[in-house]
């Protein structure tokens, strides 16, 4: 992760909106791990769905 890197929604590694793909590119981890974390947040706390929608609105799409 470089200080000049910006967080974007991925246009190539996406299943729904590219949120998990963008986060995985930003932190340099596998997108499957990020997706599993989102699922655990959704099932465990119920906050995963709201957080995903907010990220979809806030994080810009990478061109």
Image: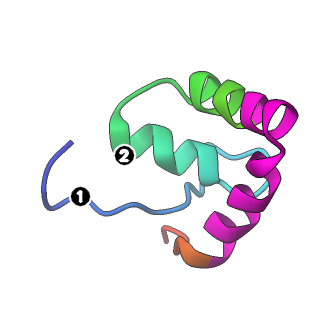
Can residue 12 be seen? no
Locate residue 18 relative to residue 47 in the image: left or right.
Answer: left
Circle 1 — which element? loop
Residue 5, numbered circle: 1
Q: Is residue 25 magenta?
A: no
Identify which residue is drawn at 15% across, 62% down: 4
Residues under labels 1 and 2: Cα distance? 7 Å
Q: For mark 2, what is the residue?
A: 26
- Most foreground residue, 52 or 16: 52
> 48 left or right of 19?
right
Q: Which image quadrant is residue 54 in? A: bottom right
- Which residues are the magenta region? 39-57
Question: Vertically, is 24 above or below 51?
Answer: above
Give the residue displayed 52% in from the left and 75% down from the top.
60
Magenta highlight: main SS:
helix
Category of crowding for the residue at label 2, using alpha-carbon neighbours closer than 10 angstroms: few (below 14), some (14–19), many (at least 20): some
Residue 56 image position (x, y, % from top left): 68, 68
Q: Which quadrant: the N terminus? A: top left
Q: In the displayed image of the protein, which residue is found farthest to the left?
A: 3
């Amino acid at each position: 992760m470089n200080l000049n890197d910006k967080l974007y929604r991925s246009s190539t590694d996406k299943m729904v909106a590219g949120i998990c793909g963008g986060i995985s590119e930003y932190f340099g981890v596998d997108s499957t791990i990020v997706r599993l974390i989102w699922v655990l947040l959704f099932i465990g706390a119920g906050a995963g769905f709201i957080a995903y929608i907010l990220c979809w609105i806030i994080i810009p799409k990478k061109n």
